[in-house]
Image (tube, helix red, strand yellow):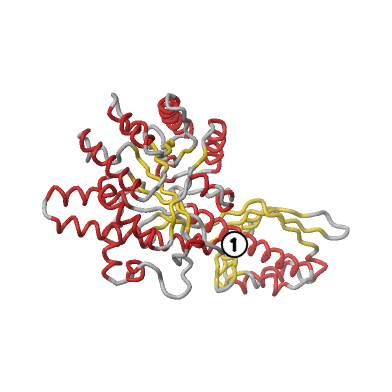
Amino acid sequence: MRRPTRFREIARDVLHMGLLVATSAGLGAGGDLLAAQPETRRPILITVDDLPVASGRLHADPAERERITRDLLAALDRHHVKAVGLVIWKNVGEGKAGLDLLDLWLRRGHELGNHSFGHPDYSVTDEAAYIADVERGRKGLAGFLAARGATPRFFRFPYLDEGETGEKLDAMRRYLGASGQRSLPVTLDTQDWSFEEPWIAARRAGGPGARAEVAADYLAALRLEVRSQERQGDRLFGRLTPQILLLHANEIGAARWNDLFDWLEKTGHRFATVDEVLADPVFSEEHRFIGRQGCGLWDRLEHERSEGAARRAIEDLLGRQAAAWNRGDLEAFCSVYADDATFLSPSGVTKGRQAVIDRYRSRYPDQAAMGHLALEILEARPIWGMETDRQSNAVPGEIQGMTIAARWSLTSPGKETVSGLTLLVLRPRGDGWVIVQDASM
């Protein structure tokens, strides 16, 4: 589940622009990976967040909550789907009614996992408090399942947010391992929840027209999400990838899941179990994505690959720069500076690449004076931020730069080694990288 967005309006704009024609028709022309052949059907796991029922503010009536639950389950039954439902234990409430709704899911053969107690956002929650909330949710669900011969195997991060620091990420991984839970990722992240309130308002207003419009937007949005994120996963791994779809237990889903599942079946998907899907090697690639907002697994992996490529390119650039220094080629050494680069040192500020070259020439008139340069990278930090894609999902933005903290040392025969620290800021330019700022000391 995401923070509020303008997704519904954007989806309508996209639909009116005619960008969903191929989606509505089913298969695209010419070699679509999703050709509806039995041997090429794409496995897809359906997962449902915020059980027993999402949007408690909109659905306080127990009878209405039961109706929604039964309609959701009927749609899953019709398409022979075995889903994983993620329970917010606070949503279960006091008394028997909430537990009875969870029992309905179990009796239909679905699995229940932990979605925390109170749905906190990890990036704005203290690590200890967050883990305590997740454990409280696990204990509540575990007690319920134990009497029915089951145990919670899966946990899903609220907002898909796994923390904004490496320490938080590691702390949750240690906790999940110790408590016997596996993080259940999402590859098809949707904004289906954002249609719930408009759907309720349309129903209460009466008349089929308003509801039909919301339903059309809902289905068009989900189709667009599925198509774009599946292409991303296939591109990352060079093959047809299994998918994990995120939906929510809400009323518009109860009314429109049949239509969504019909479309999935017609476009070459087959509904798979959690164990089958997670057995695919694509889910064994552990990421170390750190961000202040959550996103789907494909975005995490793609961003990490981009970071790795940027680091390798910069390491290669700095290696070539050191090699140029060591052969006495100051022109080549300074060629990695931007035309408007700024160089800071204890002696002052130098602006522009040509001025940087002149500075070095005045201090190191020949190769003997230059000595041998060694550069040790101490830290590399990419410059990027979370952005919003066309579907209003939070996604990692492109890497806009990299900061490098390094230690340099100069050795010359018969002289004492000189060393210091440098902080470099690099930006991508054309097909490579350039240094825009250099603070050396």
Q: Which residue is drawn at 81% across and 58% down?
A: 411
Q: x%, y% of residue 426?
A: 57, 63
The residue labelled by disc 1 is 310
Q: Residue at x 75, y 58 (%)?
A: 374
Q: Which residue is drawn at 40% across and 53% down?
A: 189
Q: Residue 289 vs residue 292: left or right?
A: right
Local crowd size for mark 1, using a 10 Å CA cut-off: few (<14), some (14–19), many (≥20): many
**Residue 405 versus residue 323 in the image, above or below:** above
Could you say which is closer to the camera, residue 189 or residue 403?
189
Going by the numbered disc 1, the residue's amino acid type is Ala
Q: Residue 219 vs residue 117: left or right?
A: left
Total marks shown come to 1
Q: Residue at x 31, y 30 (%)?
A: 100
Q: Residue 350 vs residue 156: left or right?
A: right
Quadrant location of residue 84? Answer: top left
Q: x%, y% of residue 165?
A: 52, 43
Residue 399 visible in the snapshot: no
Could you say which is closer to the camera, residue 294 or residue 29?
29
Could you say which is closer to the camera, residue 439 or residue 208?
208
Residue sitting farthest toward the right = 414
Q: x%, y% of residue 145?
A: 43, 28
Could you say which is closer to the camera, residue 23 or residue 416?
23
Quadrant location of residue 161? Answer: top left
Residue 318 visible in the snapshot: yes
